[in-house]
Each structure stands twice: as structure tokens, then as C-alpha cells.
Amino acid sequence: MAYAPEHFTVWMEIPVTDMEKSITFYNAVMDAGLEIDNSGPNPMAMFKTKDPNRGVAGHLYPGKPSGDGTGPTVHLAAPGKLEDTLERVKAAGGQVISPPIPVPDGRFAYCLDLDGNSIGFFEG
């Protein structure tokens, strides 16, 4: 029997070159309340879920982004209407790469963050 866990994605990490600028970007786009946490071996900024004991989340960390959308795409929940999120991406210095794309469970759009990380924003 093929491996079929409840959730294939258990955590995500987005590498960034400038933590402060990236925190400002993601907070402007998502109002995520990101802040630097220095409690581990490296600084990070956590995306927090509604229930801290459940849900799939992740963090920003100082790293080497693939850039220009060549790495994996992380899809994040868009806060509110997708078009509003895309406007905030542009206003915060990111790039919108695609128009909204409908899928059976909602819509998403491809974007690039300040480091060229491929980010999808999903409205379900």
C-alpha cells in the first residue's frame, strides 16, 4: 500500500536574505504578525496558526533563496479576497506572476516575494 499520511506537508521554510525586510513584506501582505524569534540556533519568524497545537505552519529564516521563482512554490492562505492580497503584494515590492487561477477548492495566484521565492496565495 502506498504511503498516505493525513498531511504530506508538515512544515515549510522560506529562505530570505534580509529578515527585517521580509518580515515587513509578509506582514504588509498578510498581516501575519511575524517577528524575529532568536530562541533557536538561527533567527526565524514564525507563521502562526489559529490553534498553536494544530495546523501546518512554517517560518522565514536567513538562507539562500533560489530566486526568480526557480525553487519550490509555497502556497499560503490569502487573508480575505485574493485580489486584495495581490494588490498588497505589489504595494510591498513583490511581483504578481499570474492572474487568479480557479481550482475546485478555490483560487490561487503565483507571486514572487522580495527574494524571488515562488509564493502562491490561495483563497478557498
Image: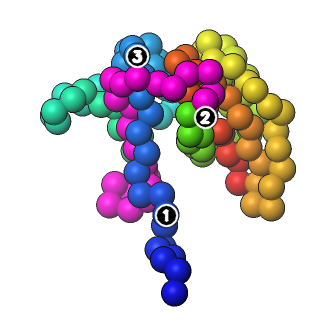
Relative depth, front residue between 38 and 62? 62
Which numbered disc flags the more N-terminal residue, 3 or 2? 3
Within the image, what quadrant is residue 38 found in? top left
Residue assigned mark 2: 119
Q: Majority secondary structure of the magenta segment?
A: loop
User: Horizontally, is 99 left or right of 4 in the view?
Assistant: right
Within the image, what quadrant is residue 51 found in? bottom left
**Relative to 120, is 31 above or below?**
above
Magenta region, residue range? 49-70
Residue assigned mark 1: 8
Relative depth, front residue between 63 and 32? 63
Q: Amino acid at mark 1?
A: Phe
Magenta-span inclusion, residue 61: yes
Callout 3: SS: loop
Instruction: Please rate how many residues cluster around mark 1, counting C-alpha atoms within 10 Å: few if below 14, some from 14 to 19, many from 20.
Output: few
**Relative to 80, is 17 above or below?**
above
Relative depth, front residue between 56 and 82? 56
Residue assigned mark 3: 17
Q: Which label sits on residue 100?
A: none
**Relative to 16, is 11 above or below?**
below
Magenta-span inclusion, residue 37: no
Q: Amino acid at mark 3?
A: Thr
Q: Which residue is located at x 56 percent, y 34 percent? A: 71
Is the Cβ of the residue at disc 2 closer than 8 Å to that at disc 1? no
Determine the CA span between mark 2 and mark 1.
Answer: 18 Å
Is the Cβ of the residue at disc 1 closer than 8 Å to that at disc 3? no
